Image (spheres, rainbow, N blue to C red):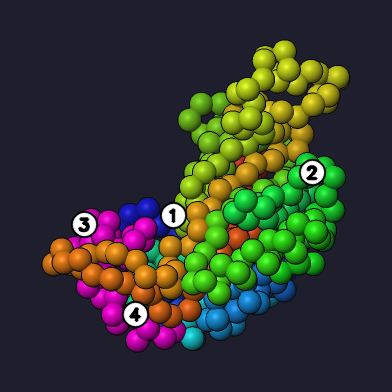
Amino acid sequence: MSGNSFGSQLKLTTFGESHGVAIGGILEGFPAGISIDFEAVQKALDRRKPGQSELTTDRKESDTVQFLSGIFEGKSLGTPIGFIIPNTNQKSKDYDALKDVYRPSHADYSWDAKYGSRDHRGGGRSSARETACRVVGGALAAQLMAEVKVSAFVQAVGPISISVPYTELDLSKVDASRIRCPHPETASSMEDYILKLKEEGDSAGGVIQCVITGVPAGWGEPVFDKLHAELGKAMLSINAVKGFEYGSGFAGTELKGSELNDSIESVGVNRTNHSGGIQGGISNGEDIYFRVAFKPIASIKKKQSTVNKSGEQVDLEIQGRHDPTVLPRAVPIVEAMAQLTLADFMLRAKTNRI
């Protein structure tokens, strides 16, 4: 199986399944001599872990990371950093009825078509549980870029969205709400909407916006490895993601060039930032901002029609513990993938100078 690694200069490889003994990762290319803030890593994991509130799955995992290599006396060695996160609260029997059934909008059939066999317990390798490893990698990557601040928040849930731009929000208040929305009135409506769907056995999708400050001009590559292209790949690799746009995005297509162009006020300073902090695939020093669209969770308790491996029509009512929406737990995952991407380009930038 290929496709388990992300990054170039800084490369994260993850392993493990949802109901296996543990999940884990190896982070290569991390420079030597960096003091590791272990509390920051665990704090990031705690923001992603299950069982946080009524808005998340009932599965209880401490998600305590154990570092195996690459760190000595609190500092990085420059060698691969290996880590594991034990799985401690699996209920594999909840998935016995799904062994030979293809769940709608899951990876069950496509996985079988590719590999011929699969771990049906919680989705196995295709489970979003794998993203905990990305959060560890992102929290470590962030420690290479003290000047860079990555802040993600829930901008929309279903038809409910924040009506003001991110520049008018206090992003330090993201964790003040269970849904991780920094606009209190909107957050309350979002939570009510999700809890109603949960009672009905349904789920909700939405949009996470990410704002990045402190990135200097010059990170990124001008052709295939454009900064926004790599950010897009990073976000689209997250479970349940269906769309990515940066800067003015699709809305910019409705404007004229004279309206969309970012007029230059002085060297390195623009009057507007429709470009989203990236021009020609390279950062320009302005805020980088983008939005990520998440579909509703596919595991719902409403009755659905599907087929089994024999091609027979069956009715399916999924049991077990599932999130009514991925959004609050996806916020730290979006941040982590952005941090991994940016740290990789930071290290690339250091090798590009003559």
The residue at the point 48 percent across, 62 percent down is 297
Q: Nearer the viewer, residue 189 or 308?
A: 189
Give the secondary structure at mark 2: loop
Work out whether mark 1 precedes mark 4 in sequence or the reverse, and give the earlier one.
1
Q: Residue 247: x, y in percent?
A: 67, 33
Q: Which residues are magenta?
A: 90-116
Identify the amino acid type marked 4.
Tyr
Q: Which residue is mark 3?
A: 113
Figure quadrant of the C terminus: top right
> Does residue 354 show up?
no
Q: Which residue is mark 4?
A: 95
Residue extending farthest to the top is: 258
> In the image, which is nearer the foreground, mark 2 or mark 4?
2
Q: Which residue is mark 1?
A: 5
> In the image, which is nearer the foreground, mark 4 or mark 3?
4
Give the secondary structure at mark 1: strand
